Every structure is written in structure tokens, then in C-alpha cells.
Amino acid sequence: MPILSIIIWLTILGGFLVLFSGDSRCRPVALGVSILAFVFSLFLYFGFDKGTADLQFVEHVAWLPSFGVNYSLGVDGIAMPLILLTTFINIIVVISAWEVIQDKPALYLASFQVMTGFMVGVFSAADAILFYVFFEATLLPMFLIIGIWGGPRRVYATIKFFLYTFLGSVFMLVALIYMYGQADSFAIADFHKLPLGSTAQTLIFFAFFIAFAVKIPMWPVHTWLPDAHVEAPTAGSAVLAAIMLKMGGYGFLRFSLPIVPDASQQLAWFVILLSLIAVVYIGFVALAQADMKKLIAYSSISHMGFVTLGMFIVFGILAKDVDGQSTSHAVLGLEGAMVQMISHGFISAAMFLCVGVIYDRMHSRQISDYGGVANTMPVFAAFMVFFAMANAGLPGTSGFVGEFMVILASFKANFWFAFLAATTLILGAAYTLWMVKRVIFGEIANDNVAALTDVNRREIIMLALLAAMVLIFGIWPQPMVDVMHTSISNLVSHITVSKL
Amino acid sequence: MKLLYILTPLAPLCGAIAAGFFGKKLGRVNSHRVTIGGVGIAFLFSLIALFANLSGDGSVFDETIYTWMISGGITFEVGFLVDRLTVVMMTVVTSVSLMVHIYTIGYMHDDPGYQRFFSYISLFTFAMLMLVMANNFMQLFFGWEAVGLVSYLLIGFWYKKPTAIFANLKAFLVNRVGDFGFLLGIAAVLMYTGTLNYGETFAAAPELVGQTMELFPGTAWSVLTVTCICLFIGAMGKSAQIPLHVWLPDSMEGPTPISALIHAATMVTAGIFMVARMSPLFELSETALSFVLIIGSLTALLMGLVGIVQNDIKRVVAYSTLSQLGYMTVALGASAYSAAIFHLMTHAFFKALLFLAAGSVIIGMHHEQDIRKMGGLKKYMPITYWTSLIGTLALIGFPGFSGFFSKDAIIEAVHGSHITGSGFAYICVLLGVFITAFYSFRMFFLVFHGKERFDEHTREHLHESPKVVTVPLILLAIPSVILGGFTIGAMLFGDYFGNAIYVAEQHDVLAELGSHYHGALNFVLHGLQTPPFYLAAAGTLSAGVIYLYKPEIAEWFYKKFGFVHRLLDNKYGFDDFNQKVFAGGSLRIADKLWSVGDVKLIDGLMVNGTANSIGLFSQFARKLQSGYLYHYAFAMIIGLLAMLFIFIFTT
């Protein structure tokens, strides 16, 4: 059974079905599509062979044979968890939009279904052009989502978002075409094996770097994200933070590290530097935000700093091979980056949804418009405090796991890397809990807050699902780490072999 | 036994979940029943564990419960280590917690957040048990942060109160500063020993002696010293040692029962417990031990001094807690780990007693906490009075009371220590004895003796607290008197702790003391002839003279030495400094990075700047295309001329 194709086309075609079912009936249809897609993705998890690093659930159809482009799909332990995350968040998105979106709900929900299909395509593509097509295609639904349902500055935000990410990926396309000329194939696996010289590697590294650094995003090419988040509707922000950013992280793992390992090694210091700037600098910037969504957006960037840090300290660890343990510590760093991506998918989505819940009621994102929400919305307050704690990396929540792993691993590379990374313990808690203090706690600040009603059943289900994931993976991350282990180990041994 | 150990922390967790999620359905009475039941089970099981350990052959339970994660060849586990150090902690935690649970029925009786409160304190008991029962650093860190979470929730329990939500954020952040160091310490342990399991780490530790790391280019730092100091920074946060002590006094904004449970008896002693647990590491670094010793003695002395000028009944007890935590830390630095744990244990009971008694006074006074507005409460609240007296005597180390044994042991241990800084520490802990007696009895006299300084309305409603309040007081008063004398022989000078605590031979000050030890009674008799006793007596006496008979002396002192008073009243300026430099500084940095870095430079100059310059360029380019033929012809002529010139001059 071609499960990957089923998930991809089920959601894309399902999107059109949602659209044609009309504004009144679109909601249950969308929910059905999203649940079905998630159920199919569960097959991936339970049918997954943890013992091999090869691609699984492989599909291969010639697409443009004259250019060597194939419709070929397949997942390994790196891609599979991200697909599950994507289809899971898709369900949450449908629930979150239920009665909130009254303006063209069919188009809205359809856009998300189509986007989910594209994103699953990104994570399952085994062909570079197919990857590129899906990678770019995700921009379109998001462009619509922000452009149609966005806030007052949505035009500026969408153009910035589109140009930024589009510009980034153009360079990637050039690199892909160059490598096609060398390898005579667009299969990503062939690129992995392709021997490349030093200069070529450096150029390709930067081509990929621009694409993925913008996407994830890294300092200093991050400023599109806060604007996009602020203007996006709630679910748009949730998907943007939970999934789209991860396409950048995934790109580093799928392309940069294995295709140009030597350049990655030489330029690791550069990425590590930017990552640490992201953790510290962005942590401070988040502290200064007056807009809740902007604050969470900056928090996302800071958390993504851990992802890129975890990926590139690997080279620092491998260089310090003193006791023969370095490969295992390198694996720790990479798996930490992966765990951080998945966990952040749940937590950031939850944080944005929390803001959405009160935004729907008060139509303000300004922290100063709130105060004492706990008085009128006690259940909501409990959720918000829980997710805030997860965002601050409290042990027992999934937010802790990735950060813990990356900090432990980076100590191996350099004490100061760990030192700077660990400042997130203080900064992350400061910006998150300070926001909680001003929004949730205190006396009822004004009449609007006094008139608030607590979360309804739909909102409770939506937040409880996410809370359950955050808690489960915090208490027992093994099922998540277990599936990626072989693929990550394979990646580490792959990048230790020079291509020069 | 494994099942019993698993159920011990789970029982309070179940209680917390029940009261937390189903509190409304259960109602108030059932909520406190289910949580008290959970903690009661935990207490019972802790007792079983205690006696099993005492009667057993000294074998230690050290097993994995489940594998949390395997990554990078490192197995992260959740597991329990139950040895004699653990059972002491388990018993202390669950017994005080049980008393506080019962007391809460009375104290929080009219509070709308009744169920929530019970849920939190049971959750705390769970987290604290996970902390003390851990057999690895990962779980330790989990418990460590989880108790911090509950502390945060409980300090801010009255979330409408601005001071409470300020205090809980402050507490969490200051603790996070400590945890920052702690996490680096854990990372160092993993890096140099390759494991997070206690047993394996301790076995590997001796190999690290002499190993160095390069923190700054060209400098060599002892791996063990760096690791131990990083770990100890964690302890400084949790156990509120200078300069990370600032959160504890503010934490008094929370309800009194949690001040007793979390901020006096159990959570704040987690740091002490942790260092004692890590004794096989700390013993290998004298630098780290000296660091511990000096931080501890500064805390013991300086925080006690601040206690003298406090007028809020809870804050006096809070500063006293800080000072006593300093004593425990001093004991750790002097390698007298078992004395530290011993003092931790006795302190847990008498300090919980003092807090709960203070709470009883607060109830009686209708939530008035200013001791200047009390006085003469003795005749209105006899049980509170007598139990307070017992707690106070235990605190100042009156011979025979449990606090006497533990505090005297610490002082003697420091006296016998030869480690760098021990001379200084000895002076600090001796002076501390006088100060402790002084502030303790200052409060005691101001509250219970002398003139009644409250109004008529308060007097009418003033009466002894209900049984749910007084019974825990009585139950806590018993160990405050007798516990020390009964256990000193085994815990300090016997072989009670066995392998749970490791002391290097050259540091073993307690063995030296033990050679002169001839029973608790002798210890008391000897205690009567030593400086600490005279100092405590002097402190009590001067407090009595000043606050009962000659209040002019205090006024005279304020006038004459106003600057000392101001210094103490400002708590040495730590709060102002932190507020201005760290809090204010961070916000200023944040604001600058945001408004200059992101808005002006990146977005303004680079992003929109690029867009604007493209726009400008295209405007310019648009002007060139005017559509007039003569413009183009003119441009061609100019171009031709230019090319001719270049051609001529270059050849």
C-alpha cells in the first residue's frame, strides 16, 4: 500500500473536497480528512522498521524521465516523526478553526488540508526536484492563509514572507541543478554519495544554508517570522511554527550535512555562532515584546537555535575524539535537535492556540490589554501555565528533553557553547513567565477581562490533546527517539567520511 | 520492596491528580481526604522503608524503574536509590508533609482555592520524593525543577496579590539561575564520566582527580572543582545561599502551610541533601569544599543579622531559615555531611513547627503579621505559646533540645576542620548562635509577652486555633524536643549512613569528635561548658532585657547606629542591586537589541533597506526612459565620446 502517496493525495484532494462541500458542510469533511490522514500516518509509525537507516515505504514512478526527475517517496527515522507531527497538528488546526473562522471557512480549511499534503510531501520526497516542488508549493496556501485571513498589516507580512523564503530557495535550486550535472540524477540518495571538491562544497553549502536558514529561521534572517506570525490567523501561526519551520531543520539534515559534510565541518563554527546568537540575543529580544504573538515568535526562533546548534556541534564533538565516545555524543546532539523540533511543534502550536483563544474573545494581542485572566478563565489559565512551563523547558514536559540533550552534547564540544545555550534556562523562563504573570495573574485588569468566558469543550479538547503529547514525551521520550536512532547514527557515520 | 518504593511517590501524585482535576466533583472534604490519604500512605511506606533499612543488612536498593530514553549510547533512566540517606529524607518529607496537610484543613478553611491548594501540596510531596529517591542526575534534575514549579505555583497561590505574583516569578527565575549552574554541572558529570547514574559516577570520580579542563585558553581548571562548584550553584539557588538567597524572604507571600513545608522544612533543604549525596565528588575537591564553607558561613551570619530587624512574623522565621541553611552548608563544607543531614532533619521539624505556630498566630490575629502589633498572646493561645517556645528553644540550640545536638555538632565540626576558610567559618557560626538566640526571642517576646498592642476588635476574636491546627503543632513539638538526643549517637558518630556518605580520611572531623563522644547526656553536659551555650544564653537574655524591660535600648541603638539598621533593613542592598542591574539591565539590553538590532539594523537597514534601494534604483532607471528621441541620441553621443577617450588614453 503506497501509504505516503495516500497521505499526500488524501489531504490535497481532500482539500478540494472540503472546498466543494461548501461553507456550511466543510467542517466535518475537513475533520474527517485530517483524522483519516493521521490514521494513515500511524501506519508509518507502527509499520516502521527501526533496524534500518534505508528509506522505507518507498514509491517510485518516473515523472519527467528526460530530466531524470522521478516521483519517488520514502521515509527514514528522521522524516517519519515529522510526518506524524504534521498530520497530528492538522487535526488540531481543524478543531481550532471550527466556529472561529466565519469568513470563507471552506477555503480556509481547504488551504490547510492542501498545505498538509505539501508538507508531508516535503518530508517524504526522495527526489530533489520533487522536494523542491513541495517545498515551494507550501508557500502558496500559507500565502493565502495570511493574505486573506490575516491582520491589518498582512500585505507587508505576506510579501516579506514570500520574498524572503522564495529568495532563499532559489539558491537551493541552483545547487540542485549543479549537482544534477555531476550526478546525472536528482535522487537525494545519489547526492549523498556524490564526491564534491572543496570549493563546490562551500558554494553548495551556502546555497542550502540560505534556503534553510531563512526557513528555520536563523539570526539574522529571521525578521520575516515575527511579522508573519503576528498577521497570520491563529491556525496559520500554529502550522507555521509547528511544521513549516521544521522544513528548514529537516533540510539541514537531509541535504547540508550529508551532501557537503566537509564544508559543513569547516563552517560549523559559523552556524554554531549564529545559533548561539539566536539563543541569547533572541531570548533578550523576546523579553522586550509587548505583543504576545511576537513574543512567542521570537521564542520560536530562540528554540530553533537549539536545533541548528544540536546539528552543528556534532562537528565540534567529532573533532574532539579523545575517548572514543564522540560519535555517540554526536548522536546525542543530533537526536536532541530532532526532539527539539518535534517537541517545539507541540508547544509552539499550543502557545499560539492559547493566544488565539483569548484573541478570539478580546481581539487584542497586546499583553498590556490583559491581566488577571485566571480569575475569569481558570481552566484556560491552567493550560496556559502548563504550556508556558513547557516552553520554558520544565523537566517532565517535552520542552525539556531536546534542550537537555543539546546542552549535554554541546558541553562535549565546548564548555562555553553549553554555557551560552544553558542561558535559555533563565531567559526562556523570564520571557515566558513574565508574560504569564502579566496576562494570567493579578487582579482583573479591565471590563473586557471581566467579561471573558472560560474555554469551551472544543477548545479544551484541542489544548488537552497537545498537553497530552507534551506530557507523554516529557515523561517518556523513548518512543520518539527510538525510531530515529538508526537513521541518525547512520547520518553521523556518513558525515565522518570526507568527500574530498 | 520495589513496588513499595514505586507506590511511595505515586500515592501523593494520585491524590494531587484527584484533587486537581476532580476537586469540584469531589468537594472540599473528599479532596482533603484523598490527598491526606495519599500522603499518609507515603508516610507509612517511608516508615516501612526506614525500619527495613535499619533492621536490614545494609544492602541498598538501587534499581531502574523504566528507561526514559536511550540516546547516543547513554541510557537515561528513572530509578530509585534507597539507602539510609534516602530513608531519612523520605521520612522527614512525608511526615512534615502529612502534618502540613492536616494543618491546612484549618488554615485554608475559608479559601476558595481549597482543592487546588491540596492538589499542589500533594504534587509537591510527589516531586520531592522523586528528588530524594533518584538514583541518577536526570531524575534529580526532574525533581529539582518540579519542586521549583510547585513552589512557583504555591507562592503565587493567591494570584490576585501583586506581591505574590512578583515573588513567585522572582523565586522561579532566581532558582533558574541556580539550575543553570546545576545543569552545567550535570553536563560535566556526563562528559567526564560518561554516565548519569550516581553509582557509576562515584565509581568513576577518583579517576578524575588531577584531570583539568581549559575554560579559557591557556588556563587549567580542575575538572572536579568546576563540576562541584557548578553543582553547588544549583544548591545555592534551591537552598537559598548568598547571593541567590533573595527569593526566599519574598516567598513568604505564599500561604503559611507551604512556607513551613516547602520554604523551611523540605524543598529548601534539597540543595543540602544533594551535596551530601554527591559527597564522593565534593570530597575530591578541597577548593569546592572551601567555596561551600565560605558561602555557607556568610549566609549563616549575614542572614541571621537581617532577621533581627524584621517585623513581619513570617519574615523573621524566613531569615532564620536562611541562616540555618547556612549552618547546614557550613557543615557540608567542613565535610561533616552527616551533621548537615542531622541538622536538616531536626530543623525540618522545629522550623515547620515555628512556621505553623506563626500561622496559628496569624489566624488568631486575623491575618495581621506585624509583630509590633502583637504582644501578650500567651494567655489567649496557650498551646501555640508552649509549642512556639519549644520550637524557639530548639532553634537557638538550648541544651537537650534536638536543635542543640545538631547545631553543636556543626560548630564543633567546623572547629575541628582544617580546610581553607574554616577559621572564618568558625567565627561566623559562633556569632550566629548569639544572633539566632537574639532574633528568635525578640520575636517570641514581642508576640507572646509584654503589652497587648492590638485593638479591641482583634482581642474580642482572639482565641486559640482549632484542633486541626494545634494537633500538628503538638505532634511536631515532640520530635523538636527528643529527636536529636535519640538519634545523634547513630547518625553522627555511629555507622548509620554507611556507604551513603563518603568522607575522605583527612577531612573526617566527625570521627575526631566521635572519639570524645560518650552518649547524648554527656554531650549535653559538655555543651553547657562551651561558648555556643554562653552565646545563646547571652542572646536570649539581651533580647529579654531589650524587648521586655528596656525598649529604650533598641531606640537608642537605632538612633546611634542608624546606618547599621538601614543596611540590615535594605538586606545589604541585594534586592535593589538585582532589581536595578539584573532585572533593569536585562530589560534595557532587551529593549536595545530589539529596537536597534532587529527593528533598525536588520529590518530597517537590511531588509526594508534592500527593498527601498531597489525601489530607488528603479525610480532612477525609470527616469532614464523618458521616451524623447533626443535624450537617447544625446546619451549615445556622450557614450561614444567616452569610449573614444578611453580608447585614446589607454593605447
Image: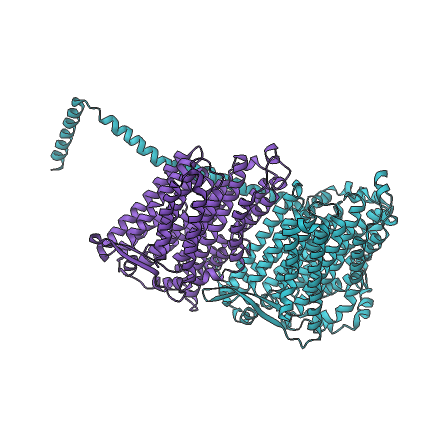
Chain colours: A purple, B cyan
Could one spot residue B195 in this view of the protein?
A: yes
Q: Position of residue A11 (x, y in %)?
A: 38, 48
Q: Which quadrant: the N terminus of chain A? A: bottom left
- Looking at the image, residue A208 sits to the left or right of residue B545; the answer is left
Q: Position of residue A418 (x, y in %)?
A: 48, 56
At x 50%, y 42%, the residue is: A295
Could one spot residue A145 in this view of the protein?
A: no
Quadrant housing residue A181: bottom left
- Looking at the image, residue B161 sits to the left or right of residue A436; the answer is right
Q: Nearer the viewer, residue B146 or A30?
A: A30
Q: Nearer the viewer, residue A114 or B158?
A: A114
- Looking at the image, residue B604 sits to the left or right of residue B465; the answer is left
At x 68%, y 67%, the residue is: B87
Q: Nearer the viewer, residue A10 or A308?
A: A10
At x 21%, y 54%, the residue is: A65
- Looking at the image, residue A174 sits to the left or right of residue B11; the answer is left
